[in-house]
Amino acid sequence: MVSIKICNGTSCYLKGAYNVLQYFQHEIEARGLHDRINLTGSFCLGNCEHGVSVEIDGKIYSVAPETAHKFFEETVMPLVK
Ligand code: FES
């Protein structure tokens, strides 16, 4: 099970964290990955300057709504295959 946390802090929220969350939720649903990915929100991850911050198994990444698709394909999918 891959654990993905999306920062809900103010800075990340303003940069589109909710859009990133919605996109990930949609992809997980569409690809039937519920049993492989645990998606949750998170308090500030201490990476505000480079948000939207996404933590996967303890590692922090910077994702924007515009790059969410690429990130999901290139970083998330290899982890669940
Ligand atoms: S608000 Fe997201 S890392 Fe601080």
Image (tube, grey):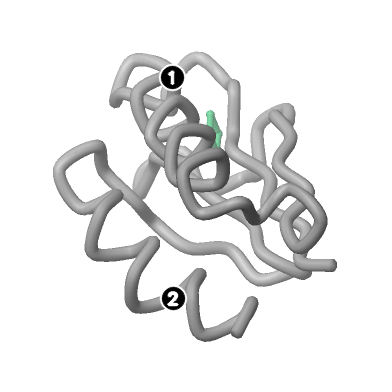
Residue 64 appears in which quarter of the rendering?
Answer: top left
- Pointer 1: residues within 10 angstroms few (<14), some, or many (20+)? some
Where residue 34 appears, as percent x and y from the top left, is 73, 48
Where residue 6 appears, as percent x and y from the top left, is 59, 38
SS class of the residue under badge 1? helix
Reading the image, the residue beneath label 1 is 18
Q: Label 1 amino acid?
A: Tyr
The residue lying at 53 percent from left, 34 percent from top is 25
Seen from the viewer's position, the closer of residues 69 and 10 is: 69
Reading the image, the residue beneath label 2 is 75
The residue lying at 44 percent from left, 25 percent from top is 22
Where residue 37 appears, as percent x and y from the top left, is 72, 56
Residue behind label 1 places its C-beta within 8 angstroms of ligand 1: no
The residue lying at 54 percent from left, 50 percent from top is 54
Where residue 59 appears, as percent x and y from the top left, is 66, 71
Q: Quadrant of ligand 1?
A: top right
Left-right relation of 52 to 44: left
- Pointer 2: residues within 10 angstroms few (<14), some, or many (20+)? few
Quadrant (top left/top right/bottom left/bottom right) for the C terminus: bottom right
Quadrant (top left/top right/bottom left/bottom right) for the N terminus: bottom right
